[in-house]
Each structure stands twice: as structure tokens, then as C-alpha cells.
Image: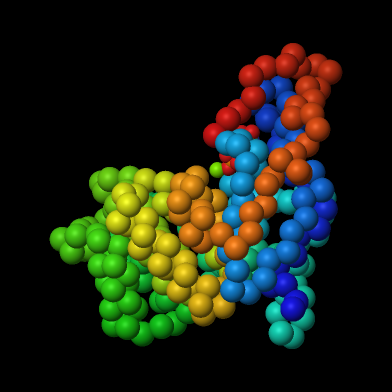
Amino acid sequence: MTPILTVEGLDKGFVLHGQGGLALQVMQALSLELHAAECLVLAGRSGIGKSTLLKILYGNYLAGEGDIRLHFDDGTLSLAALPAHAWHSLRRDVIGYVSQFLRVVPRVSAREVVMEPLLARGADAHEASVRAETLLARLNLPERLWSLPPGTFSGGEQQRVNIARGFIGEHPLLLLDEPTASLDAANRAVVVELIHEAKARGAAMLGIFHDEDVRERVADRLLPLEAFMAPSLASPTPSSPSRGLAHD
Ligand SMILES: Nc1ncnc2c1ncn2[C@@H]1O[C@H](COP(=O)(O)OP(=O)(O)O)[C@@H](O)[C@H]1O
Ligand SMILES: [Mg+2]
């Protein structure tokens, strides 16, 4: 079976301009294949590059060397050097992302935050609203919060809005960055259900889950990132003394 996503020989480093141009190499020669209807879980210690990989795949970070390709029925799309407008439609139609933290926009209600991915595709507003409310109810977000902007919500409440927004669009490829990190057991179980439902409709998922129990219930395979760690995590430029590295 053709994979939906292939990554080959991906390198990624950062130049820390605030630290005298210190170069931080994060990953080297990372390769993976992701198929429809599977959930591949990124494993490895904090700071190894799990979130960085998801951000590269969502176009938030530029990739270094390497090849990232999406495979469609009618051809292949290389994500390196993709123009900005192409990222826009890719995120609307193909790649969904549940980031670690909700990006809060003032005055936009929780319901509207969740509806937005459907409205962006031209869905009917009433239908989008009904689907948003169904998801928010499943995630046990109290109904009195639906019409309020999530800015003042607790971390767990914001995360549930973020999860509803990530799953509503039923993208064929979903990137999940610790979606259960700040949730209680009941809501973690709802997220596990959502992941199983996404798999059942054929979605491919690449996820990060610290919770052992969640990981066991959703992972079809694990990808330990240690194997792709850069040999020296930092190489200071000659003019700058070595200083503490950034951590997440
Ligand atoms: N925008 C950035 N600028 C500089 N360094 C970064 C940036 N994003 C991540 N890093 C560094 O890359 C490494 C990997 O980070 P991250 O992908 O967040 O790790 P993980 O998600 O596995 O905990 C860390 O050392 C982190 O400090
Ligand atoms: Mg992370």
C-alpha cells in the first residue's frame, strides 16, 4: 500500500540568534512512512524534536535537508519549497493539527473556534455549529462556555476546544501534539475514542502522547526519535562561548 506521507533524510537545526548565533542541530536523517488508517506515535525524551517534527510537517518550521512528500491518488506533492498559498489549502483540506496549546483569538467564541475549519471549506454555518456543539459536548465542555472566547478558560478547557477544532475537519492526515496532556481520565478516554473513529474513516495520524495508557490504546507503531538525534547537539560558532541551550 502506498503511504500517505513519506519523510526521507530530514535534517533540522536552529540558529539561536539571541545566543551569538549558536547552531543547534536537532535531528538528522529522519525517515518515516505513514499510512492511511494508522497512528504512528513519536517517542523520545523531552527536547528530542517531537514537536519540531510536527511543526515542520505543518509548515510552521522550515525543513532543513531532506524530502517530505504527500501522496494522493493522482500524484505526489513535495512539501519542500511549497508556496504559502499552497500551505493554506493543504491545511484546510489535508493536514489537521492539534497544537500543544490553543492559539486564543480575542472575541471569538469557543463554538466559532471549533466551527472555523468547516466554514473555511464553505460548509453551511448551521451544520458547522451543530457539529461543533456535538464535539464540545462529547468533550464535556460545559454548555455555558460555548459562547465565550476561550481566553479565560482553564488549560484543560482550552485544550478540549483545540481538540474539537482539530478533529471537526476530518482531515486525512492529523498531527497531534500531546492532546491529552492536561485532561482528566474521562476526557482522555474521549480523545482515544476520537482517534479510533478517525482511524476507522481512514485518517493517518502522527502523534505525541506522554500518557502511557493513551499511547498503548492508540499507537499502531512507535517511532523512537533517539535514532535520529544529531550526534552533537550543539556546535558553538568560533566567536561565541558555549552557553546554556534552549529547552521546551
Ligand atoms: N523555534 C526554535 N528555536 C530554537 N530552538 C528550538 C525552537 N523550537 C525548538 N527548539 C529546540 O529544538 C529542540 C527540540 O524541541 P521540541 O521539538 O520542542 O522537543 P520535544 O517536543 O521532543 O520535547 C529543543 O532543544 C528545543 O529547545
Ligand atoms: Mg513537544
Q: In which quarter of the image is the C terminus?
A: top right
Q: Position of residue 49 (x, y in %)?
A: 65, 42
Look at the picture and state if 98 lies above or below 77.
Answer: above
In the displayed orientation, state which residue is furthest to the top. 241
Look at the picture and state if 148 lies above or below 228.
Answer: below
Look at the picture and state if 47 lies above or below 237.
Answer: below
Q: Where is residue 187 in the image (x, y as percent from the top left)?
A: 32, 57
Quarter residue 233 falls in: top right
Q: Identify the residue at horizontal 78%, vertical 36% (top origin).
A: 230
Identify which residue, 204 or 218, lies in the foreground.
Answer: 218
Identify which residue, 78 or 202, lies in the foreground.
Answer: 202
Task: Tell me, yes or no, if residue 139 can be seen here.
Answer: yes
Q: Identify the residue at horizontal 36%, vertical 85% (top origin).
A: 124
Quarter residue 232 falls in: top right
How many circles with numbers are drawn on the protein?
Answer: 0
Q: In this view, does 52 lie to the left or right of 191?
A: right
Task: Tell me, yes or no, if residue 165 can be seen here.
Answer: no
Q: In which quarter of the image is ligand 2?
A: top right
Look at the picture and state if 170 lies above or below 214.
Answer: below
Q: In which quarter of the image is the N terminus?
A: bottom right
Quarter residue 19 falls in: top right
Q: Identify the residue at horizontal 42%, vertical 62% (top origin).
A: 192
In the displayed orientation, state which residue is furthest to the left. 144
Q: Is residue 165 left or right of residue 75?
A: left
Q: Which colour scheme is used?
A: rainbow
Q: Identify the residue at horizontal 68%, vertical 29% (top origin).
A: 17
Q: Position of residue 132 (x, y in %)?
A: 32, 72
Q: Where is residue 235 in the image (x, y as percent from the top left)?
A: 79, 25
Q: In this view, does 116 lie to the left or right of 82?
A: left
